Each structure stands twice: as structure tokens, then as C-alpha cells.
Image: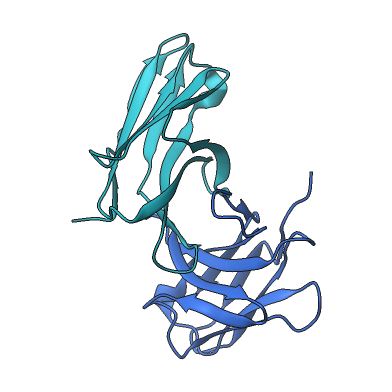
Amino acid sequence: RKEVEQDPGPFNVPEGATVAFNCTYSNSASQSFFWYRQDCRKEPKLLMSVYSSGNEDGRFTAQLNRASQYISLLIRDSKLSDSATYLCVVKFDTGFQKLVFGTGTRLLVSP
Amino acid sequence: EPEVTQTPSHQVTQMGQEVILRCVPISNHLYFYWYRQILGQKVEFLVSFYNNEISEKSEIFDDQFSVERPDGSNFTLKIRSTKLEDSAMYFCASSPGQRSYGYTFGSGTRLTVV
């Protein structure tokens, strides 16, 4: 089983739509969780950390379910500029703080 | 906003040649990393570096790879004898060290081995 698993997509949505991405991780020793955004041939950029209580940043909401080892990202009112690949990233308790990336979910927002 | 700087942005090299990829991490960060991303694949961990030594490395980081922090600012990745399969984007990253923090990535070096 992959350490961090995501649906690769692509998700094609119209502007203004709400879209949700899911991610599962295999290691219960996982400690910290993040969503990164990656534009084509660019570096990953931190979108938001994910906390157990759930957290929101503007149009973005992240949820964590430790019991199910499941992370989600909800994007409301999608903009054209949200088109990118969204990477689910886990930092495990074992190991020296390395990040483990999922393969990413590609989002395409159309006019 | 502080950033991680990588040079060069693109390097083409012949198979068997040595390459050095350079990075300037954010100045008050303590942990430094190299990751790579083969085209169309996921971002993969190579090595982490703390307190002037390697703290962890992946299976990818074999004897052909080495890292160095030659002075107070630069952090380099050397590949001694490049192979075709080393062609990838190489990202440097740094973090302040607290467990809940994400990392800041540099814009990457695209390495093409021909």
C-alpha cells in the first residue's frame, strides 16, 4: 500500500463550483499533515496545514480524521487561478521530519 | 517574504559527468532537504541535513550522491556520475524545525542527462 494515496484526477469543474479532494495515509505514526499546491513544472507551495479540529483559510477547508487516516480539502467558489495539482503531504513521526508526498490531484477550473 | 534560492534553473549534462546543484536556504532555518520529481511522478525525498550532517537519506540517495554545506549559506547536492534516470526536477527545501511547520521549497533545478 502506498504511504500517501490520492485520486490523480483530473477534476474538471466550472468556475464557482465546490470541489473536494481526498487523501489516505498508511502510517498511523503520522504526525503532521499539509496540503501543497503545485503549478506545472513549478515547486510545491504550502497551501495550508491540516489540524485535527479542521481548519479553514478563506475558500479552503481542510479536515483530518486520524481514526480513518483520511485527509480532505474542500475548495469553495472555484476560481480559474485554482487550476493546479494539489498534493497531500504527510510528515511521519518516524524519520527526521521528512515529508512524504502523494501523487497529487489535478484540478482544472474552466470558465 | 523569505525564499529558498536554487541555481542553476536548468542544467544539461552528459551521462557520466558530475553535477553540482546549489541552494541558498532561508537564513534562520535549521533543517535542509533535497527532493526530486521525475516528470509526471510524485515528489520524492532524497536527504535531510541538520547540524552539518545528514540526518536521514532515502534509498535513492546512493553513493553517487553527496551533500555539503560549504559555508554558512550554501547547501549543495552533488551527483558524481550522472545517469539518464537522474533526469528530474531537484528541489531544495528548508524549515525552521518545529514539527508542525511545512517547508519552503526553492523553484528547482531541472536536470537533463543526455
Residue at x-position 47% and y-position 8%: A16
Depth check: give the residue in front, B17 or B30.
B30
Residue at x-position 63% and y-position 66%: B31
In the rendered image, the residue lying farthest to the top is A16
Q: Position of residue A56 (x, y in %)?
A: 52, 23
Chain B visual colour = blue
Q: Is residue A10 visible?
A: no
Q: Is residue B107 visible?
A: yes
Is residue B30 positioned above or below A82 on the image? below
Is residue B41 positioned above or below A36 on the image? below
Residue at x-position 41% and y-position 22%: A74
Q: Position of residue B106 (x, y in %)?
A: 65, 56
Is residue B22 positioned above or below A60 on the image? below
Is residue A52 positioned above or below A1 on the image? above
Can you say which quadrant of the picture contains the N terminus of chain B? top right
| Number of callouts | 0
Q: Position of residue B83 (x, y in %)?
A: 43, 82
Q: Is residue A54 left or right of residue A72?
A: right
Q: Is residue A21 left or right of residue B75?
A: left
Q: Position of residue B80 (x, y in %)?
A: 54, 89
Q: Which chain is cyan?
A: A
Q: Is residue B97 left or right of residue B46?
A: right
Q: Quadrant of residue A48?
A: top right
The colour scheme applied to this rendered structure is: by chain
